[in-house]
Image (cartoon, grey):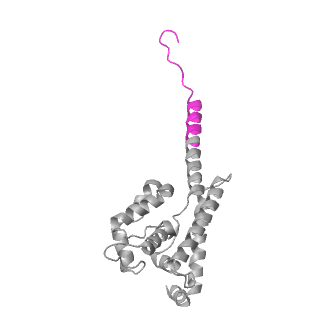
Amino acid sequence: MRGGAVPRLNVKKIGFCIAITHTRARNGYIMEIIDKMRAYQPMEWEQIPDLGLYKDQVITYIERLYAPLYGEAASRLLTPSMINNYVKMGVIARPEGKKYGREQLAMLTMLVVLKQANSIEDVARLMNAEDGAGVREVYAAFCGYLIDSLREFADTLAAAGASALNLAVGAAVGSLACEAMLTSANPERGEKEKRR
């Protein structure tokens, strides 16, 4: 550049470079999510604390458990008032001496995931729907389904042509199917739904 000449900027080229950088950053983020989904392992029953945790410890436990999947959003999955409401609604048992045991922790672990796509009423029914099984058995089934679903969605996300709309429709259809199964298991509920 002689004589203080200003170089000409190729706006198209800059826009293309920005688009490529954005796409690479997005693809990097998507790959990171896919890797997290494939690697995630829920806490096994024997690893859930059985010594009793206070409410603030329960919240920290849940945050740490789901931070690999939800990142910073894990801090919003469960609050003290939510726990109080779940106890009042009978979704989880009352704490013993202000401490929550293994069964309550397992129920809360399931609840924070299931409430993402279901009403709390439905979540309560889901956690008690495994043909009279105890919390341990329901939790084991939940963990298996969670691992399978995470892998399945990771594969869908990794596939060429995957879209957020595709994933949202899949989640909505899954929620609809769940609702139908819960209604068929409880005919009274179906009658209430028809009256609405």
List x then y, in percent, for residue 49.
43, 67
Q: Nearer the viewer, residue 149 or 94?
A: 94
The answer to whether 36 appears left or right of 162 in the picture is left
Residue depicted at 57% across the width and 84% down the height: 131
The answer to whether 125 appears left or right of 155 in the picture is left
40 in relation to 48, above or below:
above
Residue depicted at 49% across the width and 76% down the height: 123
Q: Nearer the viewer, residue 72 or 60?
A: 60
- Does 18 appear in magenta? yes
* Residue 99 shows up from this direction: yes
23 in relation to 153, above or below:
above
The answer to whether 34 appears left or right of 125 in the picture is right
* Residue 169 shows up from this direction: no
Residue 11 placement: quadrant: top right
List x then y, in percent, for residue 98.
31, 73
- Does 156 appear in magenta? no
List x then y, in percent, for residue 3.
49, 9
Residue 82 placement: quadrant: bottom left
The answer to whether 118 appears left or right of 86 in the picture is right
Q: How many marks?
A: 0
Q: Which residues are magenta?
A: 1-23
